[in-house]
Structure formats: C-alpha cells, structure tokens
Image: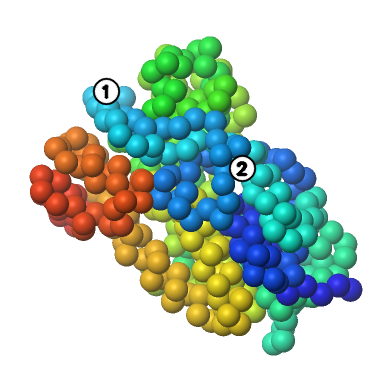
Amino acid sequence: MRHVDVLVVGAGPAGSATAIHLARSGASVLLADRATFPRDKACGGGVTGRALRQVPCDITPVVERVVDTFELRLNHTRSFRRTSTAPLILMTQRRRLDAFLAEQAVTAGARFQDGARVENIVIGEVGVSATVGGDTITADVLVGADGANGTVAKAAGLDAGIERGVALEGNVPWAVLDEERYATTAVVEVGAPAGGYGWLFPKGDHANLGVGGWATEGPRLRDHLARLAHAYSVDPDAITGLRGHRLPMRRIGASTPASRRVILVGDAAGLVDPLSGDGMYEAFVSARLAAEAIVAGAPESYPAALADALDHHAGASWTAKQALDRHPAVCFWAARSPGVFGVVAGLLRGDVGHPDEARGLARPPLRLISRVARRR
C-alpha cells in the first residue's frame, strides 16, 4: 500500500494540468490513466487564445496549425469569412497534446502511470483508497479527470445535473481538400445537427471533419457527417479514424463538482461549453482552481470558485445555443453583422470576457440573439 497526497484519475488536459499545478506546489501526486500513451482521443483539438492563457506550460511543440480566419456557413449554402489580426486558435491533436502534458506533469514532479485502471474506489472521512493497476493507493484527495464516462463521479455520487450531447468526427487527408484555402481557417456549419454544428479544422497533414449536437441526434450523426463531407466534395468513405464521443454540459447550479474528499475537473465535471462543444478552457481553469483549493486544504471552496470563474460565460453560451438551435438563420445574420466578429474574435482570444462587453454596432445583433433564445 502506498500513500500520496493526491490521486488524479485521467490524464487528459484537465488531469495533467491539475497534476502540474499540484506537483509544482510540492504535493505528492499520482496521475493515472487506463490508456497507454500516446493514445488518440475524440476531440476537435483546438486551443483558443482564451484557453492558452490558462495552460500551465508552453504547448508550442505540439501545435500543428495556427488559425486566424473564421468561416461560418449556413445549411451548406450561404457563408462568410472573417480574418483576425492575431491568432484565434492553435490546432493540435489530442494524441500529441495529452502525451506532452503528461510529460510536463512528470517534469513538475508527479508520477505518471498509464495503462493502469483505477478500480475499487472507497471514499472515507479521512481519505480515499483505490486500486491503481493492481496496486492499492491511498490519498488525501481524489481528483476525477476521467472524462464524460468516468467512474470517479459515479463513485462519489457527483454525476447528477449534467446534460450530454454527442459528436462524431474523423480525419480527411489534404489530398482531397483545398489545403491552401483551409490551412489557417476554422469552418463552422450551422443549421444541423440540432443542438450543434458541423466543423472543419485544419491539422498538420489532414483536416478534422465532424458533427455534434443533442444526444437525440446520435442515430443521425453519420448522415449529418456524410452531408457535411459532400459539401466539401469529399467522399464520406475517405474519412478515416471515425470516433464518437459524448459532450457533457453542466447546467448552471444543477450539479456539485466536489465533496469533502473528491474534486471533479474538466469533462468529468460536465465542463464543456454548451455552444462551442469545446472544453479546453474549462479544463485548464478547473485544473488551476482545483489545485488551489487542495493546496489551501479547502476542497469545499472549489465549487464556488468554479462557479465564479465559469457560470457567467456559460450562461451566455446556453442562451446562444438555444437561439442557434431554434433560429440558425437569424444567428447567421447576426454573426455577419458589423462589429460582431470583433467580439467573437475577442472572446476566442480572451480579450473579451463576455458578450455583454460588446459596444457599438455589435450590441444590437447580440441582443437580438438573446431575444431569439426566449422565443418559441
């Protein structure tokens, strides 16, 4: 039997970032993941400028593309493009990013054990115990970073209040796409699926093509993806590495991400942005706040800190998601209105904290989105 201060289950961005912060603070940390690294993970692989400000290390070595152009399309027909004067999104692959972050956790002083299932979790008054790769580990605090389908939240009784969407994605070689056109462009296609969108994101030697929406869209995702592929003159059979995944979205105030001995971060806490389906920013913010609460000896302070950091922005995302779901054409019109891209770019870069900060010509169309969200 071995004891550590903190056992972190799951070595995605949230888990590894938590381990980095804790190890740098002097805590003894075991970071465990059931997969053997490097491993693929279903994800668009974009790190916005906003998220980059929260990453605890330089990720330049695993960046494959820098996106400065945004293209919005409506129902595979109308579209418009806007370019920012500064980078908006850094594109990577989770296979590379996650392995790199786990390495950084080890460099910081954490122990990383991959290919190790975490089972037999027992949560007590004075600590937790679990079997990690066959060995019994005890810890003062357990961090659940094991994603949308993780076991830590279930073991701790913290898995309520999370709504789940679904997504399906794959990769397309540049040989069948116009690399020059899309090399620095993130394309978002609204209008379908319900509760989401389609996308094309550039990577090093390929583009990532995917669709996501409400959980009820699951049976239709293959058809949505095929339609999206045809819109780019791509044979759906050319899409490789198809992967489906769940999108856990926390309803504000509907879930508790911590108990006395357990803290949830990232997807395990349902911290996927309901509008974008991206969880990188939330993963890194929750990692930092979780580590701060643990180091301070006050895990119970984490839920309030998390709500203070994320709820205001999440509320705006839920509103915009509702408007987009009900009236995509109106949202498309609003997005192409003068001044709006400046706000969107500011949100992506992290220069703008909330749509309420919009000024000038951008304010009326953004207010319209709020009104549309309330209209049946």
Residue 264 position (above or below residue 320): below
Is residue 149 at least partly visible in the picture?
no
* Residue 133: percent from left, percent from top: 84, 59
Q: Residue furthest bottom?
A: 125
Which of the numbered marks, if any, corresponds to residue 97? Answer: 2
Which of the numbered marks, if any, corresponds to residue 68? Answer: none
Residue type, mark 1 in image? Thr
Figure label count: 2
Residue 123 position (above or below residue 113): below
Q: Residue at x 56, y 39 (%)?
A: 60
Q: As rendered, which of 330 and 313 lies closer to the eye?
A: 313
Secondary element type, mark 1: loop
Residue type, mark 2 in image? Leu
Q: Disc 2 or disc 1, which is closer to the eye?
A: 2
Q: Residue at x 32, y 64 (%)?
A: 312
Q: As rendered, which of 360 and 329 lies closer to the eye?
A: 360
181 on left or right of 336: right
* Residue 364: percent from left, percent from top: 10, 49
For marks 2 and 1 on the same chain, the one whose residue lies earlier in the sequence: 1
Q: Residue at x 55, y 35 (%)?
A: 63
Secondary element type, mark 2: helix
Rendered image quadrant of residue 315: bottom left
Residue 3 position (above or below residue 313): below
- Do tag 2 and tag 1 residues touch (Cβ < 8 Å)? no
Q: Residues within 10 Å of mark 2 (few under 14, many from 20)?
A: many
Q: As rendered, which of 77 and 304 lies closer to the eye?
A: 304
Q: Residues within 10 Å of mark 1 (few under 14, many from 20)?
A: few
Q: Residue at x 78, y 60 (%)?
A: 111
Quadrant holding the N terminus: bottom right
Which of the numbered marks, if any, corresponds to residue 77? Answer: 1
